[in-house]
Image: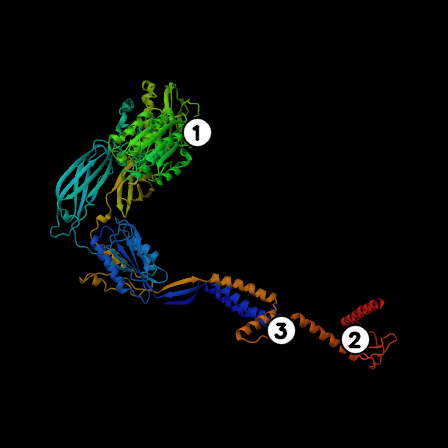
């Protein structure tokens, strides 16, 4: 199956092999001093090392060639293909793999499903896989991204086999570029077969487009065009579809039907035109809806509606949002602003903001003493995005429900304001303490809602506040240690602990309430002590000693009755609330619980309000545009909400309070800054209702608040002549801006910028570039259906341009016929070294059997080759052998000591009798004795003995000198003495004999002396 060979990335280095004979010749000359074996070993080592270096320089590789084939099927699961047809596609894939995959070659098969995104349903596997009719991969099916599926297939194909993809699709891509991606695949040698998906003709009517000018002037007539498309074939029976076309115009507070007519849509496109003229400036949404009389004639309802936007220009408008429970508190302010020719609209908090579009007519939004719980997180995000990305102003007026006192801390709105809503210094603002007792486990999803409300309360607390949570889990216990902990550094840990909370059915109130009393005693510096108890009321009622302890510690307890069984179980909760001065709530829905807990948590933030009855005068800190033309001292105020100035050079503090003596950082009355494309203002006192009532009679009251509002509004300047056109294509919105001056000359080299906000309220930066005289273009992704709002800033001194684009539905709901042109182009691509692909289709009406006649597992592609670098391993081996060469030349090793061990091992292997081997010591002694005996024989043969006067009469001395103990008979004849010879130099043996002689003489003398 695999063929192996060698390859080189840099083969020219192989010319260095010609140096090998030189290496051998030099080695023979320089290594002549070594023995024969070591010399040839050194030459071999040097040769191998040089070979390793040369092959490494040539970047040697092992090349493997495989005749395997991997086929990956790409299954289109988008909404443009009927579900019944998708089941047929799955059946075809299973049969094709079972029939054509070759086991003997170990061919692989895999499946990728795709819609908007792609996912691997089955990775390539060398067995017959079976695709389930219920696709397991989770993908979005509102678009067709064939290019993404091809890219994923290319990444999935293994390197050790040839590859082919089989595209089973209708070709109606609306994301990506399949042709470009397939071209890259063919260049990589991957084949492409195509199975076009055909579906039965179906009647379908779609509202393709609602077209209106994006920006018109008040009273200017314009045309509204609605484009309907009937995809039935002309001449087809029952091709015309009858129904009702309804066109509606919407603003933030009203909806008006412009047309509602019965229509008959013939096959093809039909355009309906309405003449429109608008007198009131606003941001308008137009919606066209087609409803068929017979639902069977219209396959999809998702494409039966279309929308468009237009902005009718007018003078500046202001939106003031006030508390629904205290309406009319800003009547004086609204009246004075209207006197300055500002259009002010008032909206109570019980009329929620539904979309960002509702805020676009207004250049500034004023939050008039409204609490945080009146807004959802999404609505807060809309207010912030309207300023940051759309350039509108945002003003927050003070009051007991504003800033930190209103629970706005730790919200996205706090980030938009020039001040922080918390006081991080406990010496400046007293702290509060909150304890929550959780017993709502018996209501549906009780533990879920308990977690939600606990998080909402903790997020509303300040950093210096304390919080604790009591649950019954076998016993009444705190959720975290210590029971009441400071929120600041522990906020994240508290929120994480709440996710692990598992409260049970509390049997009695007393233990939990007593535990809370002890917890409050542990924080004596808390200025406000507040408790919230949520329960169904069935635990044992609190006893009088526990209630007295709560009253003694000045702990206010608010109770929330949910899931109760009528007044009997509500009584303990009412008693607990009334005895301690708290509040009692009976919510009708669990969805009201977060607002209740946010509101109750605000009670802990009351110390943020500073009040003094005798009043104090705000001091001028900075000559701001808002104070332009206002001379003399400002009227006194009696209170404000304490905040902390943001540490940013963009913040401008215009007014400060001289009290309390905590410093300018916390005593801000008026602060401003630029936030994104808009401006925000924080005025921490009120507008004359409670703390600044003397201001309503002040001569500069109207001027002060009028300049505040005008400073924050979207900039108004030379509008020139700008037109904005937008087009949705390939999942993107293309924005084209044409710029002319008052003389209709092109405006060039404008430094345009802008921003867009999608349905998810996330900002999108617009990169606008000039492409022609007076023509500017930008593009951004619009993958999600919904409304996209755009704000374009043409440049300095020019007012921003506002427009909107609506993506009503995906193009999946428009395409009703296969794109044969694209599919044929993909199959016609010729992979490198092979043949073009095949369009596999049923031309005989045989169904799946006809499709199975084509074999996607045919082996006509170029064989796959894979390369593995091995030069680094050769280089490592050469380095090791180099040290072996040095060792061989520099170190001599005697292996004689291994001979006994080798002999013993061979005896055991061949079962031979071991030969006694004398020990090494005995061998040395015997060898030495034989050498001495030989020397003595030589001396005897060369020396003639003649008696000397002092010579002994027998041969004992000679024998003793030689170390011999052999005695001789006394009667033996003595040889004659040899004549004196020339004195010879003494050798080692002679010196040894004389030494022995002296030793024996000394011993004899000692014996004679005894």
Residues at marks 1 and 3, CA–CA distance in whole angstroms: 97 Å
The residue carrying pointer 3 sits among few (fewer than 14), some (14 to 19) or many (20 or more) residues within 10 Å by Cα, namely few
Q: Vertically, is 596 above or below 932?
A: above
Residue designated by label 3? 917
In percent of width and height, residue 708 lies at: 34, 26
Where does the N terminus fall, quadrant-wise?
bottom left
Q: Which mark is residue 844?
A: none
Front one among 755 and 293: 293
Q: Is residue 295 above or below residue 130?
A: above
Where, by quadrant of the figure, is residue 248 drawn?
A: top left
x, y (%) of residue 680?
A: 35, 31
Task: Examine the image and state in which quarter residue 161 appears.
Answer: bottom left
Task: Name the spot of residue 274 as percent of width and height, x first.
Answer: 17, 38
Residue 798, position as x, y percentages in the image: 32, 34
Q: Is residue 78 left or right of residue 620?
A: left
In this figure, which residue is indicated by the disc labeled 1? 425
Left/right of residue 521 with respect to residue 784 in the rendered view: right
The mark closer to the camera, 1 or 2, is: 2
Q: In terms of sequence position, does the residue under pointer 3 or pointer 2 come before the other?
A: 3
Residue 445 in sight here: yes
Residue for point 51% across, 69% down: 18
Residue at disc 2, secondary structure: helix
The residue sitting at 33% across, 66% down in the picture is: 105
Q: Quadrant of the C terminus?
A: bottom right
Given this view, does label 1 or label 3 mark the residue nearer the observer? Answer: 3
Marks 1 and 3, the one that precedes in the sequence: 1
**Residue furthest to the right:** 949
| Colour logic | rainbow
Name the residue carrying label 2.
Answer: 959
Query: Crowding at label 1, few (<14), some or many (≥20) Cα neighbours within 10 Å?
Result: some
When the figure is inspected, residue 732 is found, relative to residue 614, above or below; the finding is: below
Report the residue that reaches farthest toward the left: 237
């Amino acid at each position: 199956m695999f063929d192996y060979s060698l390859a080189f990335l840099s083969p020219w280095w192989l010319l260095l092999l010609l140096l090998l004979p030189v290496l051998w010749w030099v080695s023979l000359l320089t290594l002549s001093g070594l023995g024969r074996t070591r010399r040839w070993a050194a030459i071999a080592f040097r040769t191998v090392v040089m070979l390793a270096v040369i092959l490494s320089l040539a970047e040697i590789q092992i090349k493997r060639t495989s005749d395997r084939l991997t086929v990956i099927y790409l299954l289109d699961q988008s909404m443009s293909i009927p579900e019944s047809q998708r089941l047929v596609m799955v059946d075809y894939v299973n049969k094709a793999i079972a029939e054509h995959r070759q086991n003997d070659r170990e061919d692989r098969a895999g499946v990728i499903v795709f819609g908007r995104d792609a996912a691997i349903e089955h990775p390539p596997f060398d067995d017959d896989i079976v695709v389930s009719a219920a696709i397991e991969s989770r993908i979005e099916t509102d678009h067709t991204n064939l290019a993404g599926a091809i890219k994923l297939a290319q990444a999935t194909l293994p390197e050790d086999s040839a590859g082919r993809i089989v595209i089973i699709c209708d070709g109606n891509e609306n994301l990506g570029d399949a042709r470009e991606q397939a071209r890259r695949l063919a260049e990589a040698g991957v084949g492409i077969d195509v199975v076009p998906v055909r579906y039965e003709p179906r009647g379908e009517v779609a509202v393709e487009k609602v077209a209106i000018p994006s920006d018109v002037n008040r009273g200017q007539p314009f045309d509204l065009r609605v484009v309907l498309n009937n995809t039935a074939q002309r001449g087809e029976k029952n091709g015309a579809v009858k129904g009702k076309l309804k066109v509606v115009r919407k603003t933030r507070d009203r909806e008006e039907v412009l047309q509602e007519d019965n229509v008959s849509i013939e096959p093809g496109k039909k355009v309906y035109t309405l003449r429109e003229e608008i007198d009131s400036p606003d941001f308008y949404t137009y919606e066209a809806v087609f409803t068929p009389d017979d639902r069977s004639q219209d396959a999809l309802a998702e494409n039966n509606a279309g929308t468009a936007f237009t902005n009718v220009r007018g003078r500046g408008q202001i939106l003031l949002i006030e508390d629904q429970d205290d309406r009319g508190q800003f009547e004086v302010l609204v009246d004075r602003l209207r006197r300055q020719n500002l259009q002010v609209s008032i909206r109570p908090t019980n009329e929620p903001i539904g979309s960002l579009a509702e805020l676009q007519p207004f250049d500034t939004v004023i939050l008039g003493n409204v609490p945080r719980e009146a807004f959802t997180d999404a609505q807060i995000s809309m207010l912030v995005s309207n300023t940051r990305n759309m350039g509108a102003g945002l003003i927050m007026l003070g009051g007991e429900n504003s800033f930190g006192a209103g629970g706005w801390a730790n919200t996205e709105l706090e980030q938009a304001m020039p001040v922080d809503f918390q006081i991080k210094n406990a010496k400046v603002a007293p702290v509060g303490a909150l304890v929550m007792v959780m017993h709502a486990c018996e209501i549906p999803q009780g533990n879920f809602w308990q977690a939600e409300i606990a998080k909402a309360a903790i997020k509303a607390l300040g950093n210096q506040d304390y919080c604790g949570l009591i649950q019954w889990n076998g016993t009444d216990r705190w959720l975290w240690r210590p029971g009441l902990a400071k929120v600041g550094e522990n906020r994240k840990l508290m929120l994480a602990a709440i996710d692990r909370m598992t409260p049970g059915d509390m049997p009695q109130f007393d233990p939990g309430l007593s535990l809370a009393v002890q917890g409050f005693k542990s924080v004596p510096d808390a200025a406000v002590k507040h408790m919230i108890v949520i329960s169904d009321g069935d635990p044992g009622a609190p006893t009088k000693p526990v209630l007295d302890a709560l009253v003694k510690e000045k702990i206010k307890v608010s109770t929330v009755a949910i899931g109760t069984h009528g007044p009997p179980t509500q009584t303990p909760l009412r008693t607990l609330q009334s005895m301690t001065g708290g509040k009692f709530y009976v919510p009708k829905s669990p969805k009201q619980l977060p607002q209740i807990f946010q509101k109750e948590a605000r009670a802990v933030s009351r110390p943020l309000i500073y009040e003094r009855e005798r009043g104090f005068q705000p001091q001028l800190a900075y000559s701001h545009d808002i104070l332009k033309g206002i001379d003399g001292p400002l009227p006194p105020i009696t209170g404000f909400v304490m905040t902390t100035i943001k540490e940013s050079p963009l913040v401008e503090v215009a007014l400060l309070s001289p009290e309390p003596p905590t410093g300018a950082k916390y005593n801000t009355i008026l602060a401003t800054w630029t936030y994104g494309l808009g401006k925000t203002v924080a005025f921490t006192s009120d507008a004359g209702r409670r703390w600044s009532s003397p201001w309503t009679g002040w001569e500069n009251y109207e001027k002060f608040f009028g300049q505040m509002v005008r400073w924050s509004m979207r900039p108004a300047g030379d509008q020139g002549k700008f037109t904005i056109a937008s087009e949705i294509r390939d999942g993107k919105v293309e924005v084209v801006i044409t710029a002319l001056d008052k003389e209709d000359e092109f405006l060039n080299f404008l430094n345009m910028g802008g921003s867009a906000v999608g349905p998810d309220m996330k900002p999108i930066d617009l990169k606008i570039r000039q492409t022609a005289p007076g023509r500017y273009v930008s593009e951004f992704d619009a993958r999600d259906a919904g409304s996209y709002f755009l704000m374009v800033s043409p440049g300095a001194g020019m007012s921003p341009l506002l427009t909107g684009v609506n993506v009503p539905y995906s193009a999946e709901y428009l395409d009703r016929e296969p794109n044969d042109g694209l599919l044929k182009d993909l199959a016609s691509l010729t992979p490198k070294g092979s043949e073009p692909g095949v369009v596999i289709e049923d031309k005989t009406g045989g169904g799946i059997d006809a499709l199975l006649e084509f074999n996607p597992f045919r082996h006509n592609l170029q064989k796959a080759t894979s390369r593995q670098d091995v030069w680094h391993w050769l280089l490592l081996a050469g380095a090791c052998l180099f040290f072996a060469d040095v060792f061989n030349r520099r170190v001599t090793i005697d292996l004689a000591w291994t001979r006994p061990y080798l002999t013993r091992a061979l005896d055991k292997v061949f079962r031979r009798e071991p030969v006694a081997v004398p020990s090494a010591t005995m061998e040395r002694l015997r060898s030495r004795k034989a050498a001495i005996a030989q020397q003595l024989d030589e001396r005897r043969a060369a020396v003639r003995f003649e008696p000397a006067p002092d010579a002994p009469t027998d041969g004992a001395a000679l024998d003793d000198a030689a170390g011999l103990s052999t005695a001789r008979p006394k009667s033996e004849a003595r040889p004659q003495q040899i004549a004196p010879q020339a004195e010879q130099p003494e050798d080692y043996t002679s010196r040894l004999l004389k030494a022995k002689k002296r030793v024996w003489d000394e011993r004899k003398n000692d014996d004679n002396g005894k």
